[in-house]
Amino acid sequence: MTDTTLDEFKAECQSLYACFFFSVAGMQERGKQIKKTRPSQLNRVFIGPKDPMLHRPIATLNSRALIQSLSKDGIYSNELAKSLLVMIFARWDEFYRPLLANHRGVDKNSVKSDLMGALRLLRNVIVHANSKIDEQLVKRLAPMGWELIPGEIIISEEMMQQFIELTHSLDVRFTRYAT
């Protein structure tokens, strides 16, 4: 029963990676299209579902900043990766971890995973510390398999891929057993 639960979690992680992968590819392609526009049109980009000549745009952005944000490992890719990692942890902690515990007849806190523990720390850094890590957190995030340095953590496409690959062989242990 727990193998099925872990398989479902891994499949959900892979689905979220597909969301990330195709979103980033679309962002990069759109950035290339915007970059090709004539320089006289490069001051502002109007964004919205309707023709900006006839309707008020939802957003108006500086074109150079937008192109940079849409580039490989740009700001948008980083923010999407962070959002999905926070979501993955929420799904683990609120759904899959309790389900695993229930299957074993133990408390949720008895379900342990080094990778998910590191993801919990990363989630806390993203949500509560403006994505800034210190030397101690660099060491505690080692299960992620990333080469980190103190300062603001930027999640690259490669880092996101590495994390999802680590979930393929996710190791879970139980610290207390059912009585």
Image (spheres, rainbow, N blue to C red):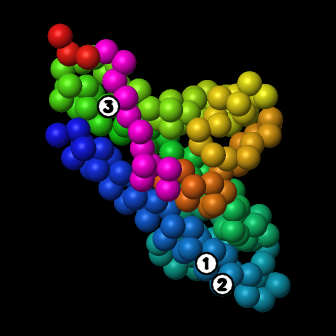
Residue 127's disc number? none
Q: Pointer 1: what residue?
A: 30
Q: Is residue 56 visible?
A: no
- Residue, x 33% and y 55% (percent of image)? 11
Q: Distance between the residues labelled 2 and 1?
A: 5 Å
The disc labelled 2 sits on which kind of residue? Gln
Q: Pointer 2: what residue?
A: 33
Decide if residue 176 is on the left or right side of residue 112: left
Mark 3 and mark 2 lie on one chain; the one further toward the N terminus is: 2
Labels 2 and 1 touching (C-beta < 8 A)? yes
- Could you tell me residue 143's position as x and y percent? 59, 38
The disc labelled 3 sits on which kind of residue? Arg
Q: How far apart are marks 3 and 2 (CA)?
A: 43 Å
Q: In this view, does 64 lie above or below 112?
A: below
Q: Can residue 131 be seen in this view?
A: yes
- Could you tell me residue 68's position as x and y percent? 75, 67
Q: Pointer 3: what residue?
A: 97
Is label 3 or label 1 in front?
3
- 10 Å neighbourhood of mark 3: few (<14), some, or many (≥20)? many
- Could you tell me residue 154's position as x and y percent? 70, 48
- Residue, x 41% and y 39% (percent of image)? 171
Q: Which secondary structure lies at badge 3?
A: helix
Q: Which secondary structure lies at badge 1?
A: helix
Please check the rendered image and state whether residue 71 is part of the magenta-colored stretch, yes or no: no
Decide if residue 39 is on the left or right side of residue 179: right
- Residue, x 75% and y 42% (percent of image)? 148
- Residue, x 52% and y 79% (percent of image)? 51
Q: Which secondary structure lies at badge 2?
A: helix
- Could you tell me residue 13's position as x and y percent? 40, 52
